[in-house]
Image: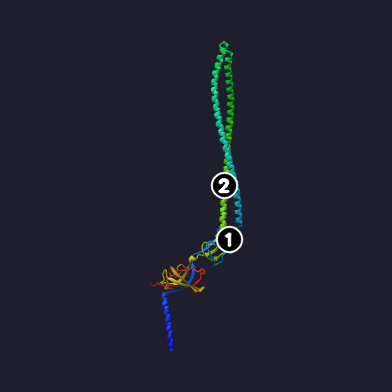
Amino acid sequence: MKKIVIILIVIISVIFGIYMINKNNYVHSEAVFVSTDTLTNIAFKIDGKIKVMTKEEGELVKKGELLATLYTKTLKAKLKEIEYKIKGLKNKLLSLKIEKEKLYKALELKKRNGENNIKNLQVKINSLKYQIKANEAKLVKLEYDKNNFYKLYKNKKISFDSYQKVKTEYEYLFNMIKSQKENLKALDIALDITQNNLQSINNEFKSIDILEENIKSLTNNIASLNEIKIQLLIKLNDSNLTAPFDGVIAKKFVNPATVVKKGTFIYSIVNPKNIYIKVLLSEKKLAGIKIGSKAVITLDAFKNKEYKGIVYQIMPVSASTFSLVPRDIASGEFTKLDQRFIVKIRLNQYDPNMRIGMGGEVKIYKDNK
């Protein structure tokens, strides 16, 4: 019997010794929670009725993965209508540009021909004026010769043929000058007509200005419709809600067929990179706990699995400091309470099965150096 008692005492002593050794090596806490400081709420940027929702709470999502869509029949119909309008205006614009180009080329050709005709007529008029002036000077001399030859003929100093020859030259030149003057009048009339035609052609260029204004107006209309088209395309794109990062659906706020306003929360997503283990640790257990201290966590949901991590933050104030109802110590009455401090532990590896709010236990190994 004594041997049994001795053996029991030894076993109890060993167990107590191990407990004391462990107690000096780590601290234990059951105030453990899976937590995050960032829950990202996502929403549509436009109003609409939800057509499809692809995820449920707790499901994993990949960045860019489709989460929900809105009904887009009305938007697509408007987009199609705008595209038809743009197409019609572009065809009309092309037609006006072709018309403008053809008219411009035709008027430019007429203008050049008119200007060339005016130059040619002016050259002819100037040349004819010079010829008339020269012939009139010659006619004056012939008239003098004709009169002298007539006197000589009357005085029978020359023959009638000699006189007749000079007279014929005079009459021929006189008639020629008369004809040239008639031609000059005709050329002046032709010049006036050509100049008036050129003025009309220049006036026709105003129709090009009108076409240009119509082209400018159509271009502006097309630009406005393209802006509307871009806005519709943006709305169609915004009718698809996608995951902004890899994560887990923490909350599903609405269901399909719900009519929502822009900004209404559809899902709340947890970013795995921001998940950590929050520990409420007694101030009596803080000694030896530092940034970088190793920790082993077990969660109530996964009793047979251990998670390893390190302490990356120890809050500088107690958890009760920012309580909505702080303790009143102004009266002098004071009851000492064991304060708890938040210790944050970053896991070495994220488990997608973890859920925010899960509880568990932790061992944080002390650094007694």
Pointer 1 with pointer 2, Cβ within 8 A: no
Cα separation, mark 1 vs mark 2, equals 35 Å
- Relative image position of residue 24 (x, y in whole percent): 41, 75
Q: Secondary structure at mark 2?
A: helix
The amino acid pointed to by label 2 is Thr
Q: Is residue 206 visible?
A: no
The quadrant holding residue 11 is bottom left
- Badge 1 density bin: few <14, some 14–19, many ≥20, Cα 10 Å: many
The amino acid pointed to by label 1 is Thr
Q: Which residue is mark 1?
A: 69
Query: How many numbered marks does the figure carry?
Result: 2
- Which quarter of the image is occupied by the C terminus? bottom left
The residue at 58%/32% (across/down) is: 194
Residue furthest top in the image: 155
112 up-or-down from 252: above or below: above
- Badge 2 density bin: few <14, some 14–19, many ≥20, Cα 10 Å: some
- Relative image position of residue 116 (x, y in whole percent): 55, 33
- Which quarter of the image is occupied by the N terminus? bottom left
132 up-or-down from 97: above or below: above
- Relative image position of residue 186 (x, y in whole percent): 59, 27
- Relative image position of residue 212 (x, y in whole percent): 57, 43
Q: Is residue 251 visible?
A: yes
Q: Which residue is mark 2?
A: 219
The quadrant holding residue 200 is top right
184 up-or-down from 213: above or below: above
Figure coloring: rainbow
